[in-house]
Image (cartoon, helix red, strand yellow):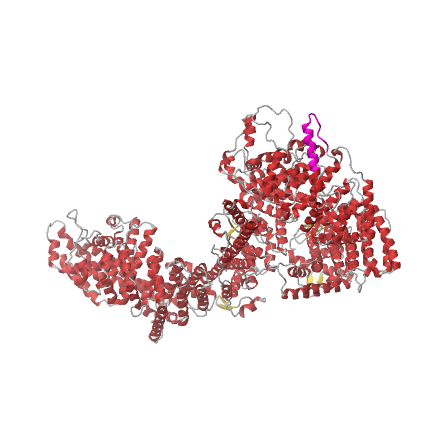
Amino acid sequence: MVPAKQLLSTIESTLLGPSPPTPAQRIELMHAIHNSFSSFQSLLSYPPPKPSDRAQVQSKQVRLPDSSPISLDDQDVHIALKLSDDLYLNEIDCVSLIVSANQEWGLLGREPLEILRLASGLWYTERRNLLTALYTLLRAVVLDQGLEVDLVSDIQKYLEDLISAGLRQRLISLIKELNREEPAGQGGPHSELYVLDSRGALVERRAVVCRERLIIGHCLVLSILVVRISPKDVKDIFSELKDTAAELSGTAATLKQQITFSLLFSLVISFVSDALSAVPDKASILSCDVSFRHEFQEIVIAHGNDPNVEGFVDCIRLAWAVHLMLLQDGTVSSALSTDLKNICACLEVIFTNNVFQFLLDRILRSAAYHNDDEDMVYMYNAYLHKLITCFLSHPLARDKVKEAKDKAMSVLSPYRSGSHDRVHEGNLNSQQAIEPASLPFVSLLEFVSEIYQKEPELLAGNDVLWTFVNFAGEDHTSFQTLVAFLKMLSTLASSQEGASRVFDMLQSRTFRSVGWSTLFECLSIYEEKFKRSLQAAGAMLPEIQEGDAKALVGYLTVLQKVMEHGNPIERKNWFPDIEPFFKLLSYENVPPYLKGALRNTITTFIQVSPIFKDTIWSYLEQYDLPVVVGTNIGNSSQPMAAQIYDMRFELNEIEARRERYPSTLSFLNLLNALIAEERDVSDRGRRFIGVFRFIYDDVFGPFQQRAYADPYEKWQLIVACLQHFQMMLSMYDIKDEDIDSVFDQSQLSAVAQSAQLQMQLPVVELMKDFMSGKTVFRNIMSILTRGVNAIITERTTQVYGQLLEKAVQLSLEILILVFEKDVIVSDFWRPLYQPLDIILSQDHNQIVAFLEYVRYDFRPQIQQCSIRIMSILSSRMVELVQLLLKSNAANCLIEDYAACLELRSEECQIIENSREDSGILIMQLLIDNISRPAPNLTQLLLKFDLDTPIERTVLQPRFHYSCLKVILDMLDQYIKPDVNALLHEFGFQLLYELCLDPVTSGPTMDLLSSKKYHFFVKHLVTVGVAPLPKRNNTQALRISSLHQRAWLLKLLATELHACDISGSLHREACQSILAHIFGKDIIEDGIHSSTLQNGDEDSGAGSMSKSKVLELLEVVRFKSPDTYPKFSEAVRNLKYVSLVEGIIGNPTTSEKGGIYYYSERGDRLIDLASFRDKLWQKFNLISPQLGSFASEAELGEVRETIQHLLRWGWKYNKNLEEQAAQLHMLTGWSQIVEVTVSRRMSSFPNRSEILFQVLDVSLSTSASPDCSMKMAVILTQVALTCMAKLRDERFLCPIGLDSDSFTFLDMLMMKQLPNGACHSILFKLIMAILRQESSEALRRRQYALLLSYFQYSQNMVDPDVPTSVLKSLLLSEQEGEDLDLQKIHKEQAELARANFSIFRKEAQAVLDVVIKDATQGSESGKTVSLFVLDALICIDHDRFILNQLQSRGFLRSCFIRISNFSSQDGGRSLDSLQRACTLEAELVLLLRISHKYGKLGAQVLFSMGVLEHTSSCKAVNIHVKGSLMRVETKLGRDVAMDIDRQRMIVAPILRIVLSLTSLVDTSEFFEIWPYEESDEYGFVQGLFGMMCALFPRDSENQRKSELKVFQLCFSLSSYLYFLVTKKFLRLQVSDVSTGYNVQQQPTLALLGSLLNSVTATLERACEEKSLLLNKIQDMNELSRQEVDEIISMCSRKECVSSSDNIQKRRYIAMMEMCQVAGNKDQLITLLLPLAENVLNILLIHLQDEETVEMITHGAKSDLEQDLPWLCGKLVPILERLELLSEDKTGHNLKVFRRLVNSLKELAIQNLAL
């Protein structure tokens, strides 16, 4: 047996879905309903209580079916027995009910009464689902829903079998049984009166049962149309009808009335359908039973005492008579005679009791009938149509109708004299208007009108009805019958066919006394009478006779319908002259209801043609009553001497006395219709100020104090007023000049006040009213504060309920419009006027009142307005949540919002406009409020605990009914994915945003990680890798599906990134996510484990043939739809397309005059409504005649063009949304990949394989021609991350190996990726770089990836690791390490050759792109492009790259850029720094050429003038003459920054120079470097300045940058050595200036200081290196504390966590020490030649006798002491250098020591000087 909820879901998704059911759905449907046959057959029949079961429950040990024994406590037993007593259920089933309630709601901590109500509500929900499922099946067969014929046939066969098995008898008995006061029905005297429904709302049990009875009644009606009814069933239904009708006496319970209607129409449909279905070979079921016919005739003809019951019995008599009429032809003569007698008897009673009037008053015009199920009302009307058609086609009935007509003509007088005050003058459209003397013929005409007014399509081909029209239209001697006939004609004109037929009928004078000419002649006659009376002095205006007035109203009503529904082309010529309708409007003696009919008629002409609009305006100004503004007229300062007859007078003096307002109502409707058609808003509504003041002051202002004879008319007036206010607020905007329009008018004179009134703007006046809480605001609040419950009651029980509903909707819409405008002026209008939220906050009940309208589910627009207002208030009122909590409305609102969202999720049809989707509005409200200060609205509606810190909330969605429960259930079940696509999308987004928010992330992630939901991985199959819907017919679903996957992936990435895996909950969730996405096993603490331990999900993980991460990427690997703003060829060929490009090109939004808007997803789309309006405006400006005098051909062409453009706009929107969705999903995919790669990759044993797969597929996709440029950027970023991780993998211990035994040689021997994989990466990367659609931003990332790849493919032996360190690491290895290293070198050489070979195939194209970027790109683009060229030179063979750079002129252009470099701002801006980086890259490229190609490269550079260009580069002079001059006196932070900039430029130049010195003959080279500074840039002087700044350094304070500083010092010392040896430069011992212009030079003392610093650094580096190497060898012997100290010393604490084991810690420490040791050895290697340069310079000076004499020659005062002083400083330094050990330095020091000894000897000798 299928559960009822699942059954209903299956039926609705198959039969009510937006698309035809699939074969799988059909199979599932038939399987489900066949398994539920017994449930339907014994509908709502459940096992009764049993003593044995009761005893078992009382024993507290219960065994449920298919379950182990369950232990109960005392409370469980009490609740179970109470349920059994209250519901008449078996005790064991009651225990099952409690168990189900616990699973659904969580009963722990609830009160016993609440548990009882929840369990009862769950039971009634199951019953309701079963009943609804049956109703849906019956509806699918009876109503034409567009389903496939064979599917309908299968369902019909199933229902026929079901009905034959006794379903109908069960339905009839249930209607009776459920009405009894007993546990199985409405409840016994001791039963609980309330239940908690599925939404947690408290509902009266009687109401629930009554609703069940109504659904059963509807099922009964539909079942009769599936299988014809039996005589017994007819009698049973008739008996139940009389019993139910008797209960209606003195009550207006809507549901009970609707149940009675269902029983009534069951019999009506039975009689009509049974008779109509009789054919010669298939007789009527009821007619076959002669005894039944006789018996039922006696029953139905018998009279009763209850008039209410008699009315319903009369209706059955009518249906029975029609049944007998239809069966006359198939009966024998004796039966025929009996049937005729029976028919006549029934007809006599029918007309005597006037059953037609009863049908009108008690059924068709009742609120219960109007509010019944729409499908059922349609069915009722359809069979009333068949009933009346059959009735009027029978001779006996026609004779009876003729008799009734004659009687009416004789009884009713032709005219009725007297005052109009005594007769009914109300709105004839009012549904409560009843004629004083209701005769059968008049009632029959109105009955026919009422039927076809609701369903005008039933008129098609109804010849019987038109025959009756011809009969009824003749020889009217009474205006009552004429009015009734005209009303019937107006109804018949409610379709296009009917309108044309009625027009022709009245135009051709089909009837002698009824025609259009009669209407116009009567209007003309009375207009002439009024004219003559005005011309005669002292004459009184004539009275319009009541009969004429009512007849005129009838004619005008017909004319309205004819013009409203007539053919749009033909109707333009039907009444070309509309002036007669205006001429009677200004006369006081014309009855107000006639004026109302005239204005209503005029209103219909507005839509006929634009020409009529201007005509109507002119005639209104000429004929209609004026509206006077102000208390004074003109410029006169005197008060009015007499009362003016204007609209105010008519309203307050005429209509108010009669308490009926048809004239005012029609006036407002006419003006509203005219204003709605206005397109010129330049005057901002100033011309309508008179109408506005009339409505404001006289109609809407005092509406609560007026008396109304008809409440329907009251609400019509209110709706008209509200529509006017809404138009004023929506059509006109607040502008800057309105800000100064606020001032105190009390001091103005009367004349000034009147003039000021004339200049008012309606929109400004309305804003002032609302922002000060005045008239309109108070009246609107009086409507809204009636409360949602009261509105619901009146909506369902009163005829005016729908008008009241409309008034509520307009009131809420007006509030929203005011909210949109008040912020513009509130700051300027204070303190007289305040923002609307401030006004509302003065009474919190007002806010609560209209927020509760989210509960109103009769009209979705009201719910949507309430939600929008909630959104506005939540953004303005910080205290909103506290306000709701204090008002005790919070819990109700939580449930109401959840119920609204759940109701929307159960819809079966797609809502096209998401802005009109209540569910989407709620989801957006929740998302928008997440980041607002706590407690915010999202936290309230999702039931976070607001009494404690939000972060500590333990979410319990199963315990509390809230939006969170609805959203989780909706995503968990994932039903109706096409209808609820947007809801699912925003559901995933909401959960993602909650997990991202720091306040709500903890509780939300804990909830989603729990085993109750398994949320993170559950949807990877159902959503993530499910097939993507096709674009052709489900593009909207396709777009939403992509977004759903995007939010899901981002949600998973958030969990992986932010969760704390120290807890088991999140650790298991992360493991599950990783295993599902990458389809691999994971490693946890060294243990190989599978995805999940239990459940069906882990079985899928291990058998995955393809990683889901690749399947997810496959989803977005499709060509993006075209989103360029260009027209299709079909549209471009249209005539007016060239005029539209200006509209499309305007980027502004529709609110600012453009055509674009931002969707709920943030996409900028075309607002099709604004686009259409702009197009019409454009065409009207180009061709003004289009509006008035255009031909149909021209208008048709324009319409066709606009339709083409609108279709193009729609397609553009969808394509843009799809592209954005594609990028969004790819972004989500990239996030989860990058988070996994960067943070969670250590869990996988085969990391390199996974990384290569992702990298390979990313490059393949980015190189595909279907991949857009934006996608390629994202994919390249993913590839960069994977490539970086692959580089890291080379130095990580593989999982599964013991890190204690993992040696450096093992690391070198590890083959992370085979050469074939590397070749694939490089090839695909090159293809991606050469893709057709590209950008510099994309190529920068691709270049970075290429550089990263080249680094990865280099030798695994890091070139920065010195040989000595490498040997030290390999000391304990086996003897074959040399062979292993040779193998590694060989493989790396093969890979390098293969890399170049792959590049060589596409070299020309790649170089074209790279060189173009290096020369024409941005500064950052140039920089990275130059580094790419540098990398390509590294892998070059046969000087291919060098030749290409030369032949393309790139090297020469590079030299020119170096030479022309300048920095206008001194190099302190970001642009200058970027240019400096580019210059550095160019210098590095030149240095690479010299290094790679050796002497040939250097010769090429030298021949191209490298030295001339570099020497003329202005970059070397940045801050030289300014900042560097201050180095001698002030060493500070700013100077260090300037020095860094110098190193970036000068150091590469020096390296180039040094590279050239070793390759080119010095005699050729250094001639251009004279010692004397002769050039304008001071290059040599700048170098001397750098020496003076850098040589006297403090090695202890600059250890972090010492390597770079010493590199620069080495370059400078090399140049100084050259000057000393080649140019015979001689230095002073100390700095003694002898003149102002003497050049600054380094001194021997400065060199001594440098030598001291170098010596100290050498000693320290050797000791540290030796210590590190010893520790590396003893790494496995170190304790955890020692290892942690090493890690801390290396500042790498972030690499380890407290949970990491000792192996990982030793591994990290070893790698860090290797790096430090390598740095120390690199420093030693640099310092030794630096020291040699300094020693040689000093040695040359001490050996040269002339130098010594020059030093000692001259003044003998202080200079004589300089040399001995210098030597005294040198000796201890040299002694320290002699102590350096070759073991610690790792270098041969034999030559170095000889040099030290030589200098030491000379120094000692000079000490004696």
Q: Nearer the viewer, residue 933 or 1263?
A: 1263
Can see residue 203? yes
The quarter of the picture where residue 42 lies is: bottom right
Q: Quadrant of the C terminus?
A: bottom left
Total tally of numbered discs in the picture: 0
**Which region is colored magenta?**
522-543
Is there any visible trace of residue 67 in the rendered image?
A: no
Where does the image place residue 1245, in percent across and percent down from the top left?
Answer: 47, 68
Report if residue 871 lies within the magenta region: no
Residue at x 47% of width, y 54% of height: 1125
Q: Position of residue 1047 (x, y in %)?
A: 52, 57
Residue situated in front as seen by the camera: 499 or 283 = 499
Q: Is residue 607 left or right of residue 1118?
A: right
Residue 542 in magenta stretch: yes
User: For this rendering, which residue is in front, 54 or 41?
Assistant: 41
Image position of 417 (left or right of 648): right
Q: In terms of depth relative to the viewer, which is nearer, 96 or 398?
A: 398
Residue 98: image location, x then y, percent: 69, 58
x, y percentage for residue 899?
63, 51
Q: Main secondary structure of the magenta part?
A: helix
Q: Residue furthest right?
A: 334
Decide: is 1100 above or below 724.
Answer: below
Q: Quadrant of the N terminus?
A: bottom right
Examine the rendered structure and indicate whether residue 450 appears above or below residue 659.
below
Residue 3 image-quadrant placement = bottom right
